[in-house]
Image: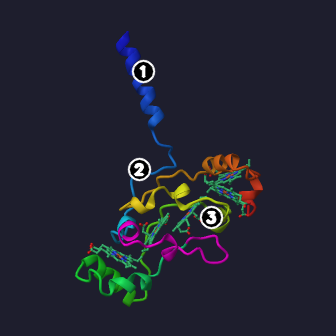
């Protein structure tokens, strides 16, 4: 009797701790072992140096190899990963990074509007500066977007996010 109750309580606790399905427990496989912890926390680089949010401000964008080669034409040149990076740069190719956070293209989303309304990168992407590998650790499903809109008193009108449909 007690054992059954205890097991039921344990099962309920485990269910409560299961992450939302929109959160990924494993990181996508990347073409190079790029570490935010190394570049941001150790080297002191800022998010905007690599993700500048150019006009019109929808995307934070990913850096071109030329930016990387600013250091890696002399830093760690003996590494096979840096050799691969230098090879892509010489061929004028981008690094084929796997996406971590994506919304369908029929959803309106602007990085600039959110950052200027006071949201930080960490609010939506977690403690990136401490991560050697990125995975989708924050929920950015429709329900999560709407939770923050409700909390910040922003509109939750369907057409705010779905005007293109
Ligand atoms: C030296 C350049 C560099 C800096 C500085 C940098 N990043 Fe990145 N970032 C990258 C690269 C390269 C990738 C793609 C590889 C990966 O996902 O780890 C990336 C990926 C990301 C992604 C996932 C993108 C996707 O496709 O979904 C997020 C989110 C992100 N960075 C946020 C940040 C934040 C927040 C900061 C500051 C704390 C930051 N980055 C600083 C280079 C940088
Ligand atoms: C400000 C200089 C700087 C810039 C810009 C920079 N890196 Fe680095 N990177 C470093 C340093 C320093 C290390 C650590 C080297 C070591 O372990 O001795 C490093 C390490 C790495 C490593 C690990 C190499 C290995 O085999 O251990 C990879 C991969 C890497 N960087 C990729 C990138 C990519 C991709 C970009 C552009 C998005 C980039 N870096 C931009 C300075 C930089
Ligand atoms: C309000 C939530 C939110 C905030 C704040 C936010 N992001 Fe994002 N980020 C997203 C969403 C949603 C996506 C997927 C966008 C898409 O697919 O168009 C994304 C995608 C990205 C990507 C992949 C490339 C791209 O532009 O789609 C990078 C890099 C990134 N974010 C970096 C950052 C950085 C750096 C900051 C801080 C300056 C930041 N984000 C702030 C929600 C946010
Ligand atoms: C951290 C809180 C937060 C999260 C998470 C968030 N939003 Fe917002 N969003 C806001 C706030 C606050 C505003 C109002 C900004 C203003 O009007 O200045 C806003 C405004 C908007 C707007 C109207 C701005 C414009 O572009 O005209 C759209 C569209 C939008 N959000 C879409 C989304 C989507 C899609 C997601 C999920 C992928 C999302 N938001 C997640 C806080 C958030
Ligand atoms: C704050 C932004 C936001 C608002 C407001 C919003 N949505 Fe969404 N919606 C999203 C995002 C982001 C997705 C894609 C991610 C997902 O499926 O969770 C989505 C996906 C959907 C989908 C596809 C679901 C699926 O499973 O593929 C439908 C249908 C939808 N929304 C309808 C609505 C309706 C109806 C309203 C008004 C009651 C609404 N949305 C309001 C952001 C929003």
- In this view, the residue in front, 60 or 160, is 60
Residue under the point 42% across and 27% down: 11
Q: Few, some or many C-alpha atoms within 10 Å of disc 2 (few <14, some 14-19, many ≥20)?
A: few
Q: Where is residue 34 in the image (x, y as percent from the top left)?
A: 36, 70
Q: How crowded is mark 3: few (under 14 residues within 10 Å), some or many (20 or more)?
A: few
Name the side, left or right, on which 134 lies relative to 144: left
Q: Disc 3 or 2, which lies upstream in sequence?
A: 2
Q: Are marks 1 and 2 in contact (CB under 8 Å)?
A: no
Residue 65 lies in quadrant: bottom left
Q: Which residue in the protein does label 3 denote?
A: 115
Find disc 2 in the rendering and name its residue. 25
Check residue 23 in the rendering and tell me which mark sits there, or answer none: none
As displayed, is residue 13 above or below residue 92? above
Whether disc 3's CB lies below 8 Å from ligand 3 is answered yes
Examine the residues drawn in magenta and state their main secondary structure.
loop
Q: Where is residue 66 in the image (x, y as percent from the top left)?
A: 43, 86
Q: Quadrant of the C terminus?
A: bottom right
Quarter containing the N terminus = top left
- Disc 3 vs disc 1: which is toward the camera? 3
Question: How busy is the neighbourhood of tag 1: few (under 14 within 10 Å), some, or many (20 plus)?
Answer: few
State which region is magenta: 39-60
| Residue at (38, 18) in percent of width and height | 6
For the point 50% across and 45% down, the residue is: 21
Q: Residue 8 carries which label?
A: 1
Residue 105 within the segment the image draws in magenta:
no
Q: What element carries label 2?
A: loop
Could you tell me which secondary element the residue under label 3 belongs to? helix
């Amino acid at each position: 009797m007690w054992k059954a109750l205890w097991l039921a309580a344990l099962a309920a606790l485990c269910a409560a701790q299961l992450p939302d399905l929109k959160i990924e427990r494993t990181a996508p496989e990347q073409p190079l072992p790029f570490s935010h912890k190394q570049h941001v926390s150790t080297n002191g680089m800022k998010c905007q140096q690599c993700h500048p949010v150019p006009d019109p401000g929808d995307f934070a964008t990913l850096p071109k190899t030329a930016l990387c080669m600013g250091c890696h034409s002399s830093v760690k040149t003996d590494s096979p990963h840096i050799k691969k990076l230098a090879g892509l740069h010489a061929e004028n190719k981008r690094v084929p990074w796997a996406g971590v956070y994506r919304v369908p293209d029929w959803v309106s989303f602007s990085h600039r509007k959110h950052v200027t309304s006071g949201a930080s990168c960490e609010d939506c992407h977690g403690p990136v500066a401490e991560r050697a590998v990125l995975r989708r650790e924050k929920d950015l499903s429709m329900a999560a977007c709407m939770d923050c809109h409700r909390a910040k008193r922003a509109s939750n009108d369907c057409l705010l996010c779905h005007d293109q449909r």
